Amino acid sequence: MQTRRLLPLLICAALVAVGCSEDAGSKAKGGKRAPAASTSPCTPGKGEKTAKVLLRCAAGSVAYVSNPMSTGTGVVVEEAGKRYVLTNLHVVDPFDSADVTFGSTTLRRVPVVGVDANADITLLGPLDDDDRAPIPLGGDSDVESGDDVYLVGYPGESGGTNTSKPKDLEATIARGIVSRTRKVDEFEQRFIQTDASISGGQSGGPLFDDRGRLVGISGLSFADEFALALVTSDVRESIARILDGKGHDYLALPLRPEGGDGSGTLRIADSEDGQLLYLPPADEDRTLRLSVSGDDTVVSVSSLVEGAPLAVSSNSLRIYQEVENRVAARRGGTPESLPDAAAMGLDAKVQAREVAPGRFEVPIAADDGAVVYVERPLADAPGEVTWSSDLPLLQVTSERFTAAIQLDEPLDHVFTAFDDYVELTLDLEEGERIEVHARSATGDTGFDLIAPSVTLDAVTRADREVDGIENVDDTDDGIYGVDARKVLTATETGTYRIHWYTNDGVTEMARISVRKCSSSSCRDPE
């Protein structure tokens, strides 16, 4: 039995991406390409070893970037006389700032300037510390297959903003060769592929050539063996978009107490919908006293730093078991498996923090925060859940995005870290053939096509293996083989629904399109 979303209790899972702009010959704003640097502060002198020079250069210009949920690498760049830290968006997502560490010096909560969700790029800053030498973005067009390249960063370093870090963090370096370049023409992106080792914590780090020039920003892996670095011409244009105010909207959580409410109402659309309440970190120990209405409401409270369950409503096991029972009954059998209490974090200590039905007293450690996830897994229709708390909480989710999609008109959408899916509608005639194509330059996207006669209730939402619902995911399409493309035939006349989603849990841009097919004009990807 397969379910799309079951037991979503641990919201603060680690953000895992070792993963994503424009052809090197493309034009920047004004029709002129930004100049490439021919030399760099990291360029080796006569007789110097490239790797040693790069590590020395990195000590003041390549940063360890961290927040409560993620770590990565950043590099100091300069634009219009101001210095910023350039890194991957997925390194800082979903927060409004990050700590930036150079050796033993940490700059706390450096703000996010803006984001480019298509290129997975963000800027932090501007920096007040003039001691940090910027590294100019070099000439990616000069790098060829077979050239030596060097990846600098902080792979393997543990912890985020609120955990102790080792003194005097040291950058690491890995050498490889350029195996090839890869283009994603539709999203106007080009990547340098190298066998230089990449792992968690490396995202956002600089890729240098053997002359010490910064030729790419790492962030993706390919085929489990290769690093992919976005070429610097694309990075420059991404920076320009951000600083010109042409980046993407970004739903960011504050890393310090800021506003919030002591009570409110959450509108939960259906059994697949979940709403979030957020408690930012603070310097002192606290106790969150929270009340949530509804016998059919399931509540989980997770640590922001560790992601571990702090409290779970006692009704959760019963309600999830009921979902499985209903799914099995519709199929004419018995459940293949039932939810596991231990996997849900339902140990005695966690359960004891629900002091009465819907009332919780949850200890929150100093320098930690919490995420409260509220859902109604048995809901067949929209409903409201009221809540109150002695500590101010932020409601961070909103209503699901819906739109009518037009044939032959691609739709771009920036998914936030908190979206479940967006709902698109399309009118079709019985027998009409269409090709639906969902793709992302930086991530993994898929969709469900739902026939007009299908009733979406708690059972069908938990188990999509019903007539009239076609799930399409990972059709070996796109650069990573995780795009979704399918030729489909309408089985009835009416309004179809497309539930379009991403699988990554981070902010990213994706694109979907629908085109009408003749008998020979469309083919499924092989």
Image: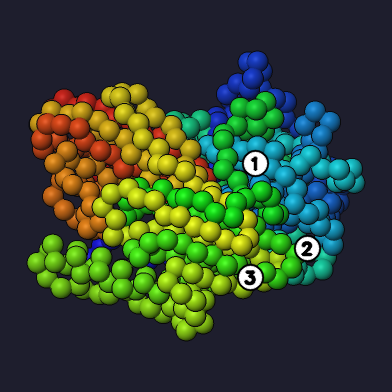
- The quarter of the picture where residue 304 lies is bottom right
The residue carrying mark 2 is 170
Q: In this figure, which residue is indicated by the disc labeled 1?
A: 122
Assign a secondary structure to mark 1.
strand
Kind of residue sitting beneath label 1: Thr
Q: Secondary structure at mark 2?
A: loop
C-alpha span from label 3 to label 1: 34 Å
Frontmost of labels 2 and 3 is 3
Q: In the rendered structure, which amino acid carries the disc numbered 3?
A: Thr
Dot 2 surroundings within 10 Å: few (below 14), some, or many (20 or more)? Answer: some
Crowding around mark 1 (Cα neighbors within 10 Å: few <14, some 14 to 19, many 20+) is: many
Please state the horizontal and vertical placement of residue 104, each as a whole percent of the image. Answer: 84, 62
Residue at 70% across, 71% down = 285
Q: Position of residue 152 (x, y in %)?
A: 70, 54
Q: In x, y percent, where is residue 186? A: 44, 30
Per the image, the residue denoted by label 3 is: 287
> At label 2, which amino acid type do we have?
Glu
CA distance for labels 1 and 2: 23 Å
Who's the residue at 22% across and 58% down the image? 459
